Image (cartoon, helix red, strand yellow):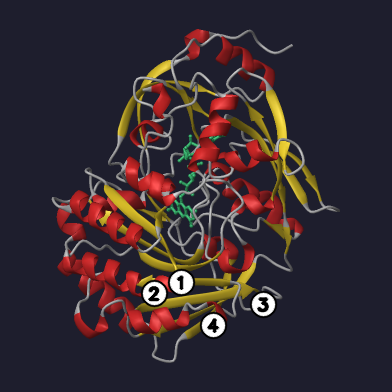
Amino acid sequence: MPAAPDSSRWVSETLTTWGRARHADTLTLRAAGDDAVLARELAAAGDLPLIVYGSGRCYGDGALNSGGRTLLARGRDRIEEIDREAGVVVAQSGVTFDDLSAALHPIGFTYPVAAATGAVTLGGATVNDLHAKNNHSTGSFGRHVLWLDLMLADGSIVRTGREHEPELFHATLGGLGLTGIVLRVALKLLPIATPAVDARYRRVADIDEYLDLIQPENLKSGFWFGWVDALTRGRHMGRGILETGDYAPSSAGMQAAPKPTKVPLDLPRVATHPALIERYNARRIANLSPDGLSIRKPVAPFYFPLDHIKGFNRVYGRRGFYSVHLGIPYSERDCIKKLLAEIVSARAGSIASVLKPMGGPGEGLMSFPLKGIAFAVDLPRRPGVEELHGRLERIALAHGGRLYVAKDALMSADGFAAMFPNLDRFRAVLRRVDPKGRFQSDMSRRLRIRPELG
Ligand SMILES: Cc1cc2nc3c(=O)[nH]c(=O)nc-3n(C[C@H](O)[C@H](O)[C@H](O)COP(=O)(O)OP(=O)(O)OC[C@H]3O[C@@H](n4cnc5c(N)ncnc54)[C@H](O)[C@@H]3O)c2cc1C
């Protein structure tokens, strides 16, 4: 018999997310693993707006709820079923990609799409409809979700998928946790011969070469990911290192995974000084042979390149950082050059600056991907960076582009409405399943997703 609901389990906490530029004072509750207990605890919790917090790997305010309630869902971490015949896993929404790696890789399966960190939960992956460095070949995360159990604002649970309540299903993929609490996810898996990837690295001379290489007709590998030097000016602007890869047929000759290390404290501001980063970038490129490099890597360091450095976000210091993560249609190639030039001339770039191809729209009403290029740069939080972000938003908008909300803390409500053409359909679903606006976040209020709630 499940324990009785105990409303005293709610505690006051200050939460933040990966960018550490936004914080929220909120009442938190560790989510019960049992659906019925969770429903009763939430029913007893009263009217304050609620949002779910997974692993806090979004960068901005999507998982924050100042003055409201926050359900900590990471502890719902049970893998409930692995059907090897059908290649399907059913898991609670607090299960992370790291958890799935441990369960699936030894038995010859992997998940088709992951974030670049194994800490992300299935709930967070679903409601931001993740796109990875295989988006052009595999699509985004939601495409591989067969169904999901969602707890709605009234406490009822619905199993939604492409056949049952499809509009609710599609509103939940990329729906920022505003349709309800994702309880569990059924995910179609990818069989693999071995958990290894044959990765190839080559130098790229400048942004023009990158924009030639990233065209759909040139994408021959399953994975494609370009690291970009976002500080160097002049004829080398946008130079970098292109990583491509495919699953390996065997693990013979596989490189060892890097040793774990950690950033022990918040680094001082000088650590991300542009001159220092520019020198680091130059060395990184010079260290790669002009002939390139081919290596067989374990999948984990290939999927999650920075996870062996614990607390990597502390590199940006106590003030944290923002990110700008844009999707630009292929037809607007020059827009990428304009965006990069703006960042370079503001001396705002960091070591985390990337280009990825995207294969087309995700299935979610609010999914980020489109047929084009994803361009993302972490921006250390210094004076002028908010204004720079505003300029980048306006440039992207003028070229039919959009910002990725999972990494956002700064986008304007007007920009958001102009970038996501299905916003009205999304709002209609929210009004139907959550008429009183039980699910809200600092992000949903900033972006005025439910304007009728005031
Ligand atoms: C190092 C790093 C690399 C990344 N790489 C990528 C990448 O390659 N591609 C990509 O697309 N994204 C990437 N991201 C972004 C990240 O994948 C998303 O922000 C993801 O949503 C974070 O999931 P989380 O479990 O940490 O959720 P949180 O950050 O805690 O929450 C994110 C959103 O999910 C909601 N949510 C979480 N769990 C549930 C649930 N059970 N039910 C309902 N709503 C829920 C929250 O309310 C919030 O809106 C990266 C982030 C980091 C830090």
Residue at numbered disc 4 = 218
Distance of label 2 from label 1 (alpha carbons) = 6 Å
| Residue 74 in view of the camera | no
Query: Compared to 168, does 117 lie above or below?
Result: below
- Pointer 1 with pointer 3, Cβ within 8 A: no
Question: In this rendering, which labeled residue sits more in front, label 1 or label 3?
Answer: 1
Q: Secondary structure at mark 2?
A: helix
**Residue 139, percent from left and from top:** 61, 61
Marks 3/2: CA distance?
40 Å
Label 3 residue SS: loop
Callout 1 environment at 10 Å: few (<14), some (14 to 19), or many (20+)? many
Distance in Å between CA atoms under marks 1 and 3: 38 Å
Vertical relation: 432 (above or below) 291: above
Query: What amino acid does circle 2 point to?
Result: Arg
N-terminal of the pair, mark 3 or mark 2, is 3
Tag 1 secondary structure: helix
Q: Residues within 10 Å of mark 3 (few under 14, many from 20)?
A: few
Q: Earlier in the sequence, mark 3 or mark 4?
A: 4
Residue 252 image label: 3
* Residue ID for mark 1: 330
**Real-space Cα distance between discs 4 and 2?**
15 Å
Relative depth, front residue between 131 and 271: 131
Secondary structure found at label 4: helix
Which quarter of the picture shows residue 392? bottom left
Decide which of tag 4 and tag 2 comes sooner along the chain. Answer: 4
34 and 299: which is toward the camera: 34
**What residue sits right under mark 2 in the picture?**
333
Nearer to me, 134 or 3: 134
Three-letter code, disc 1:
Tyr
For marks 1 and 3, the one nearer the N-term is 3
Residue located farthest toward the right when viewing the structure as drawn: 85
